[in-house]
Amino acid sequence: MASPNQYPLYEHWYKTMNWLLDRCDRMPKHLRFTVSGRMVTMSTDIAELLLEAIYSRDKLPKLQAINLQLEKLRLYCRLCKDRNYFTLTQYEYISREINEAGKMCGGWMKNHSAE
């Protein structure tokens, strides 16, 4: 079985999650159990689902769950931008990274469906 590090989506998400966790750590403390807490949970859930997909025979349900989590995370990132917890530059960066992860996940789903 291949190592998780051999999956481009896993590597991409690890870097994205690391960036996002740094930003969440810098948010105001009153957001720790709400917005930033949810974002941390979602980003780590995505990482766990990626590992489950890598080691699972039936990958499609895991990939669909990843896709849904990415959509939820997009919502929270937009909220952070609108409430000025993210700068416009930070929002543009994380949006690109989430979009790229979504494209990679979609490609994996398409490839898995063809098998």
Image (tube, rainbow, N blue to C red):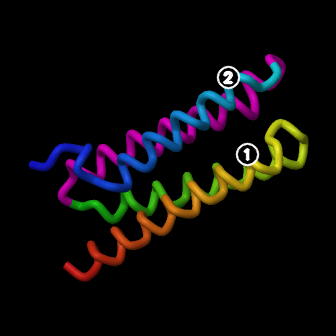
Secondary element under disc 1, as helix, strand or loop, is helix
Q: Is residue 11 magenta?
A: no
- Is 44 covered by the magenta stretch? yes
Q: Residue at x 77, y 26 (%)?
A: 27
- In this rendering, is residue 6 above or below 102? above
Residue 104 vertical placement versus 20 (above, below): below
Question: What residue do we see at 66% from left, 56% from top?
Answer: 95
Q: Position of residue 23 (x, y in %)?
A: 68, 31
On screen, residue 44 versus residue 38, left or right, reads left
The quadrant in which the C terminus is found is bottom left
Q: Which residue position holds label 1? A: 90
What residue is shown at x 25% (from left), y 44% (from top)? Answer: 4
Q: Residue furthest bottom?
A: 114
The crowd level at tag 1 (other Cα within 10 Å; few <14, some 14-19, many 20+) is some
Q: In the displayed image of the protein, which residue is found farthest to the right?
A: 83
Question: Which residue appears at 89% of the width and 48% of the height?
Answer: 82
* Residues rendered magenta in the picture: 29-57
Please give left or right for residue 113 compared with residue 65 in the image. left
Residue 21 spot, x, y in % from top left: 59, 30
Looking at numbered disc 2 in the image, what kind of residue is underneath it? Asp
Q: Is residue 26 left or right of residue 107?
A: right
Q: Is residue 71 left or right of residue 81?
A: left
In the image, residue 106 sits, relative to residue 96, either above or below, namely below
Residue 113: image location, x then y, percent: 29, 78
Residue furthest to the front: 89
Is the magenta region chiefly helix, strand or loop?
helix
**Which mark's residue is nearer the viewer, 2 or 1?**
1
Percent coordinates x, y for residue 74 in the rendering:
67, 54
Q: Look at mark 2 in the image and give the residue it sits on.
A: 25
Q: Amino acid at mark 1?
A: Gln
Q: Tag 1 or tag 2, which sits nearer the N-term? A: 2
